Image (cartoon, helix red, strand yellow):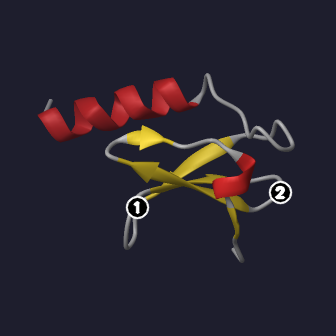
Amino acid sequence: MSIASTNTEKNSNSLALLACPTCHGPLQILSAPEQKIFCTSCSLTYPIIDGIPVLIRERATQSIR
């Protein structure tokens, strides 16, 4: 098992514990072109800054997906 796959598994497991602060929906990581967290329920996208998810409504942007 590579370090990259281990980190991906850790991120997925940690992400399962979090919910969108606006609608409480499930989140997923988007990785292109930069990492962000996307709410699959309300389509808000939250930034990841220096590896830390910023789950603050005022920092979110509406995403078309």
Between the C-alphas of marks 1 and 2, the distance is 19 Å
Q: Quadrant of the C terminus?
A: bottom right
Location of residue 1 by image quarter? top left
Residue 22: where, in percent of width, then height? 83, 44
Q: What residue is drawn where x is 69% and y is 72%?
A: 63
Q: Is residue 49 left or right of residue 44?
A: left
Number of callouts in the render?
2
Residue 32 screen position, x and y as percent: 40, 70
Categorize mark 1 by other alpha carbons within 10 Å: few (<14), some (14-19), many (20+). few
The disc, 1 or 2, on the residue closer to the chain's N-terminal end is 1
Indicate the amino acid at tag 2: Cys
Left or right of 30, for residue 28: right
The residue shown at (72%, 54%) is 58
- Where's residue 17, x and y in %? 61, 22
Residue with the mark numbered 1: 31
Indicate which disc residue 42 carries. 2
Neighbours of disc 2 within 10 Å: few (<14), some (14-19), many (20+): some
Q: Residue at x 49, y 41 (%)?
A: 53
Q: Residue furthest left?
A: 2
Q: Secondary structure at mark 1?
A: loop
For the residues labelled 1 and 2, say whether their Cβ atoms are less than 8 Å apart. Answer: no
Dot 1 amino acid type? Ser
Q: Is residue 3 left or right of residue 40?
A: left
